[in-house]
Image (cartoon, grey):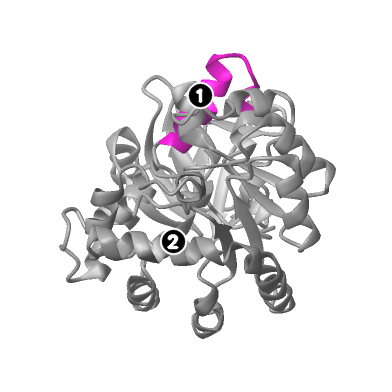
Amino acid sequence: MRISFVNAEVLGPNGLEPTPIAVSDGLLAAEIDARSVDLSGYWILPAMVDVHGDGFERHLAPRRGALRDLGQGLMSADAELAANGIATATLAQFYSWEGGMRGPEFARRFLEAHRGCEMLTDTRIQMRFETHLLDDYSVFEELIDAFNVPYVVFNDHLPHDALNKGKRPPRHTGQALKSGRSPEAHLELLKALHARSEDVTGALAALAKRLIKKDVLLGSHDDDTPEARGLFQDMGISLSEFPETIETAKAAKDGAGQVILGAPNVVRGGSHSGKVSAAEVIASGYCDALASDYHYPALKQAAFRLVDDQVLPLETAWKLVSEGPARLLGLSDRGRLESGLRADLVILNPETRRIEATMVAGRFSHLTGGVAERLLH
């Protein structure tokens, strides 16, 4: 596609400016001799890059057991990503003792379906591995190799406090049923995994070392203390997803790590689980990227919430959903509107803040409203 957009306000390093935007052969270009589309009244911004999101799960299984054709679910998720201005999406898939859609068997099914599904959005995989699955380390590593997974995050969602006290964890029966186990069998599994906690650090360090040699990007999840973050940092696990305190976020940055925060936390005005406010961490300068987490619309909403609350100007807030996550993922060809970079952009109606067009590498993945009318005129 060769096309130029004129008379729009374009977001650059210094804010919004009336700058022509040209697209040629999938790249942003200097002004070209091509059809021009008048976008007076619209804003053009870099398309968003999502570094962590599991909102696709509801498309794969809108009801429990509805898991027949994962490819159709992925295409539905693709449409939602595009409508929310996301050109690059990281699909966060669990490999967990939780079972069901988060179990090892489903993880393989998901990877196979993703490999066979052609999506308009540039989708990448993040595998979320539960660290206490010690007997699965070699199988998990083989899965990473087989599907060329570029990004792994280590989780520990075991209810250690309850298990230490010999109590049944909260919401145990419901979680057991979701896993396909009886409550009794599920509790015995949790106890067995918890009992091997002392073996995790050494095994995890060895796994991290092997994955780093394969150029796999590594992160940790819900770091609760600076000491915990430091332990991961020493293993070469550089990314800190959703640190739970501002001190932990600061420790990550001081240790040359990078911090990812949840966009829903910003939109809500605080953590749903009583952890640190993402806006507070951002205001302190300890955030590199925002992630959709479980709700794709939250990326755009969070950027504008930071602007509306006068935490950051638009050009800085938008970097947290575009240039920042792109840099974190090692994608230097996107996240900014500069000649020679990939033509990943969104066209937004500033009055409604609705994204009316999303472009991925010069192709429209989403087109609606007044922008569609002008393009088809």
Q: State whether residue 138 is above or below residue 91.
A: below
Q: Mark 1 to mark 2: distance in Å?
A: 33 Å
Q: Position of residue 53 (x, y in %)?
A: 45, 50
Q: Nearer the viewer, residue 100 or 301?
A: 100
Residue 216 rendering spot, x and y as whole percentages? 65, 71
Residue displayed at 71% across by 37% down: 249
Q: Is residue 265 left or right of residue 63?
A: right
Residue 248 picture location, percent across and down: 71, 38
Q: In front: 205, or 167?
A: 167
Image: 65 above or below 17: below
Q: Which residue is mark 2?
A: 191
Q: Residue at x 73, y 25 (%)?
A: 284
The vertical placement of 276 against 187, above or below, is above
What label sits on residue 270 in the rendered view? Answer: 1
* Mark whose residue sits in front, 1 or 2: 2
Residue at figure coordinates x 53%, y 64% from the top left:
195
Assign a secondary structure to mark 2. Answer: helix
351 is higher (above) or lower (below) than 202: above
Q: With 245 as the anchor, is 92 left or right in this view?
A: left
- The chief SS type of the magenta part is helix
